[in-house]
Structure formats: C-alpha cells, structure tokens
C-alpha cells in the first residue's frame, strides 16, 4: 500500500522589506517539503496570518522572523504568539548581532538564528536541518534514551560556515556590510574598499553580493568624465 505524501511544512515569512520577503518565500518554496503559506510585514500582520491559518484548520509550522518590525520587536511577537497558543517554531532571520538579543531569542524559543546578509544556500541549509529535526521528533511515544534527544537537537546545529558564493568569506562580508550600513551616503566600490581595508575589486564583489541578497541598492553616479561610477547604498529597512 502506498503511503500518503507527507504534508508540506507550512511557513509564514515575516519581513518588513517586501523585496527581502519575496526572496525568502522563493527560497522556501524551492526547498523540498516546504511551502510558503503567507507573508507578513509587521507583527500585527503576522498574528492575523497565524489566526487565519488556525481558524482554517491548517496551523502554520514555522515562522521565518525578522526581528526589527515597524510595529514592534520580533521577540515580543514570539512571546505574544506563545501566549495566544500558537505552537509554530521560529527561525530568526535578522541582522541583529547583539549577543543580548541572541540570548533573548533562545529564551523566547527561537530554534535557529540566521544572520543577514546570507545566501540562499544558507537558508536552505537551515530549512533542511529543521525538516530533519521535525522528522526525528515526528513519532509518538517516549524517546528511547538520551542519544535520541541529543540527535534531535544536534540536527538543528551546524559547525559549518554559512554557505557563500565561492571566493567570499563571512568575516570580509561582515566588514563590508558594516561599512555600507554606517555610511551617511552611497559609497563607490573604491571608497568601500578603502574603509574596509580591501581592494576596490574585492569590495565590489561583496557589494554585488549584498545587492543580490536584497540588502543593498546599486545605482550609477553621473556627472564625471567617462563611464558613470556605480554607487552602493544600504537598503532602507534592511536592519531587521
């Protein structure tokens, strides 16, 4: 007898930047066994989406949660949805790097914490690990022992660095992103490279990656002799 196909893991994407939200949803829908059920751009939108899903009898399984939202902090949303009886697991997808915030996220029940900027492969890795975690704990009854419990938690963790395009390193990406985020105006690749302590060519590769992941914008800067110079700006709303 053929076993019925497993129900896809339903995901709510909570992200105030519509471009980033669409990118997250695209990666979710490309991951086997996952389906984006709804997107929300605020805490209030997220709660309404969770309530609608529960009323329809199809509660959401997972929330990809930006922490800096226009009407409140994502960690307060975690506490609110728990108080309302929503059992969805939460993966924080954020640029909030403060260790105090990370500790609070663990206390609030966040199962994974993914720092922006990241590539699609990094998000897919977290989703695959989450799927294995659910599969490990999917049966009923008691755990066979400590090893089974340890394995369930271990599949959520990774000692590997988040996947980046070949030739890019996480520390340099962090430096270039910090330089761009802190700039009062747009920066050229040369200016960003000088501030980050890398060459113009290297800076441009990282800046282009930030554009590709929806965290920065790129526009030509005219008014100079010859070809216009590209100017990069941190995208407003990408500090979540």
Image (cartoon, rainbow, N blue to C red):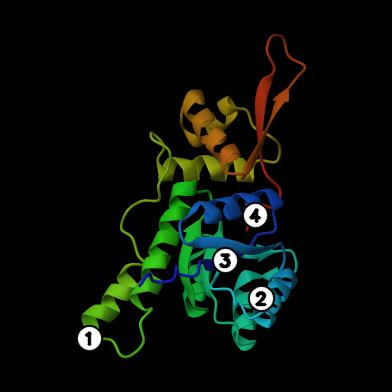
Marks 3 and 1 sit apart, C-alpha to C-alpha, by 31 Å
Q: Which residue is mark 4?
A: 21
Marks 1 and 2 sit apart, C-alpha to C-alpha, by 35 Å
Q: Name the element at disc 3.
A: strand
Numbered label attached to residue 145: 1
| Count of numbered labels shown in the rendering | 4
State which mark lies toward you, 1 or 2.
2
Of residues 18 and 169, the one drawn nearer to the viewer in this rendering? 18
Q: Residues within 10 Å of mark 1 (few under 14, many from 20)?
A: few
Q: Name the element at disc 1.
A: loop
Q: Which residue is mark 2?
A: 53
Q: Position of residue 240 (x, y in %)?
A: 63, 58
Marks 4 and 2 sit apart, C-alpha to C-alpha, by 19 Å
Residue sitting at x 53%, y 56%: 28
Q: Position of residue 131 (x, y in %)?
A: 41, 66
Q: Position of residue 201 (x, y in %)?
A: 49, 24
Of residues 229 and 160, the one drawn nearer to the viewer in this rendering? 160
Residue sitting at x 53%, y 29%: 204
**147 to 127, vertically: above or below:** below
Q: Name the element at disc 2.
A: helix
Numbered label attached to residue 11: 3
Which badge, 4 or 3, is on the more N-terminal residue?
A: 3
Q: Disc 1 vs disc 4: Cβ atoms closer than 8 Å?
A: no
Q: Is residue 64 left or right of residue 42?
A: left
Q: Is residue 71 left or right of residue 1?
A: right
Marks 4 and 3 sit apart, C-alpha to C-alpha, by 12 Å
Q: Residues within 10 Å of mark 2 (few under 14, many from 20)?
A: some
Which badge, 2 or 3, is on the more N-terminal residue?
A: 3
Which badge, 1 or 2, is on the more N-terminal residue?
A: 2
């Amino acid at each position: 007898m053929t076993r019925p196909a497993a129900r896809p893991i339903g995901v709510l994407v909570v992200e105030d930047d519509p471009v980033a939200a669409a990118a997250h949803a695209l990666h979710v829908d490309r991951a086997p066994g996952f389906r984006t059920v709804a997107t929300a751009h605020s805490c209030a939108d997220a709660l309404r989406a969770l309530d609608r899903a529960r009323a329809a009898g199809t509660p959401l399984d997972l929330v990809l949660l930006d922490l800096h939202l226009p009407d409140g902090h994502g960690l307060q949303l975690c506490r609110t949805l728990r108080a309302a009886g929503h059992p969805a697991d939460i993966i924080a997808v954020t640029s909030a790097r403060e260790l105090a915030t990370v500790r609070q996220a663990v206390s609030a029940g966040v199962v994974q914490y993914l720092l922006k900027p990241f590539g699609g492969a990094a998000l897919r890795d977290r989703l695959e690990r989450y799927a294995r975690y659910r599969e490990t704990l999917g049966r009923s009854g008691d755990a066979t022992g400590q090893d089974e419990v340890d394995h369930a938690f271990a599949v959520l963790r990774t000692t590997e660095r988040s996947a980046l395009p070949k030739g890019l390193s996480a520390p340099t990406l962090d430096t270039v992103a910090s330089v761009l985020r802190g700039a009062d105006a747009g920066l050229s690749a040369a200016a960003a490279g000088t501030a980050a302590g890398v060459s113009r060519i290297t800076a441009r590769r990282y800046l282009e990656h930030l554009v590709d992941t929806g965290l920065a914008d790129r526009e030509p800067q005219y008014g100079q002799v010859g070809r216009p110079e590209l100017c990069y700006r941190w995208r407003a709303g990408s500090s979540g």
